[in-house]
Image (spheres, rainbow, N blue to C red):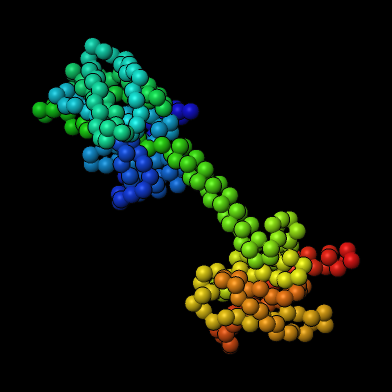
Amino acid sequence: MLRSKIVPLVVLAVASVAPALAGGATDTAVRDATRQFATTGEAPVIERSDSIIYPFGESQPVLQCTPLRACDVELEAGEVVHGVALGDTERWITSPLYSGDPEALVPHVVVKPRDYGISTNLIVTTTRRTYHLTLEAPEKPKGSAESDGYVRRVRFYYPGDMVQQWSDAAQVEASLAGRRREATVASLTGAMDPGGLNFDYKVSGSRWAPFRPVTLFDDGHHTYIQLPASAASSDAPAFLAKTASGDEVILNYRMNGSWIVVDGRFERAELVAGVGSSRRTVKLTNRGFESDREGR
């Protein structure tokens, strides 16, 4: 829904490139603005030397044009214009243009005022959305051949659509990650049903240890600890298990790719590497161990 306000122009640093905007272009400034929208709900207007980029649906676009100049309203690649309506058809002229790849043409609406000191509104309907713009032709300054209130081109970016696309992509990645984890678990344990596995572990201690686990579980017979990629370039940690009396026992383990596989289960253990000030310790606590013991 369009917010009834005119947002002041905000000048942002320009770099190349990632998300799509009107015309099929890509722009780091648009990505940053979309991130701001996702975080704060506010999408800035981006001003450039050759154009103004408005966030669609978040502010009222204003196109300032002068007589004897053609101004361009650039829409999104792939949109098809259904209709164009002008509030003042006597003193304003519009005409359609297309540019770009024939498979994803970029629609343009060219706007020309016939006089100075006039304003009206423009409505453009497309296959994707409806655009509402304010058109202004500023007063001609005294002693000047023409007004300096001239904007060559107005474009749009679509923060709402882009945030939704990012959200959809994140959900797909989360689903794929879950499937990859299930496949890995099955290959390690032979268990096709991860519901019988215990993931109720707490990891604490050194946050910056290169061997801090990313995944930890047991199947009742073995304990499986997945190390991050950074562990490949560091010394292998020792595995110390705490006995019921509080003593520490060094346990042997075997590696399966990035996984440490330990025979048996434990209530408390530590991964340790280094000595002195460079010593790093990661503590592992099996929170399901006590409840399992009580259930027996």
Left or right: residue 116 versus residue 10 is left
Please say whether residue 33 is visible from this viewpoint: yes
| Residue found 58% across the figure and 88% down from its top | 276
Count of marks, rendered view: 0
Examine the rendered structure and indicate whether residue 126 appears above or below residue 254: above
Furthest toward the bottom, the residue is 276
- The quarter of the image holding the C terminus is bottom right
Where is residue 99? Give x, y as percent: 24, 32
Examine the rendered structure and indicate whether residue 40 appears above or below residue 56: below
| Residue found 88% across the figure and 63% down from its top | 295
Examine the rendered structure and indicate whether residue 37 appears above or below residue 174: above
Where is residue 186? Give x, y as percent: 66, 61
Nearest the eye: 148 or 179? 179
Nearest the eye: 105 or 145? 105
Examine the rendered structure and indicate whether residue 132 appears above or below residue 194: above
Residue 9, quarter of the rendered image = top left
Where is residue 227? Give x, y as percent: 58, 70
| Residue found 30% across the figure and 51% down from its top | 15
| Residue found 36% across the figure and 41% down from its top | 20
Please say whether residue 138 is visible from this viewpoint: no
Where is residue 204? Give x, y as percent: 66, 70
